Image: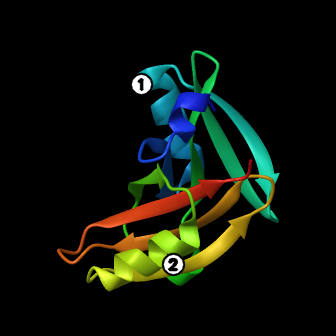
Amino acid sequence: MSEITKKLGYFSWNELLTNDVTAAKQFYSELFGWQMDDITCGGMDYTTLKANGDEIGGIMKTPAEAGEMPPMWGGYVTVEDADASAAKAEALGGKVCVPLQDIPDVGRFCVIKDPQGAMLSLISYEK
């Protein structure tokens, strides 16, 4: 991941949640020429995406707790402190939909919903 994407307020990561990871990998590698690396992160399978050698996102199986959610892309915005930003989002009328949690060796994130219903992930990276 390039350092510019870790700047505060920037979109830093894009992630696809899907029930058919294999088909998604084939589609996006052929469509965009993305390079893909399969890893295990926090006990789950994950595919990192690279464009021209730069990590830009990932693909993962939709978690069971998401229920019948259709496949979708989600964006992460870099914040200084995920906990403080989540609290501020709630104070502004938003809602935390996926509770704050740590990603080993990456940082801390949550998913919020704004007052209009749009979803967005917030992430503070380890330094």
Residue 93, above or below 45: below
Image depth: mark 1 or mark 2 in front: 2
Left or right of 44, for residue 30 = left
Point out the image quarter for the N terminus: top right
Residue 7 visible in this rendered orientation of the protein: yes
- Give the percent coordinates (x, y) of residue 23: 52, 44
Q: Residue at x 64, y 18 (%)?
A: 53
The tag on residue 98 is 2
Residue 42, above or below 39: below
Q: Are marks 1 and 2 in contact (CB under 8 Å)?
A: no
Q: Residue at x 26, y 67 (%)?
A: 118
Left or right of 125, for residue 45 = right
Residue 67 visible in this rendered orientation of the protein: no
Name the amino acid, label 1. Answer: Leu
The secondary structure type at the circle numbered 1 is: helix
- Give the percent coordinates (x, y) of residue 9: 41, 47
Q: Residue at x 23, y 75 (%)?
A: 117
Q: How many marks?
A: 2
- Where, by quadrant of the figure, is residue 107 drawn? bottom right
Residue 8, above or below 27: below
- Give the percent coordinates (x, y) of residue 49: 60, 34
The secondary structure type at the circle numbered 2 is: strand
The tag on residue 31 is 1
Name the amino acid, label 2. Answer: Val
Residue 34, above or below 122: above
Please state which of residues 29 and 58 is positioned toward the viewer in this rendering.
Answer: 58
Please state which of residues 45 and 87 is positioned toward the viewer in this rendering.
Answer: 87
The tag on residue 68 is none
Please state which of residues 61 and 6 is positioned toward the viewer in this rendering.
Answer: 6
Left or right of 101, for residue 122 = left
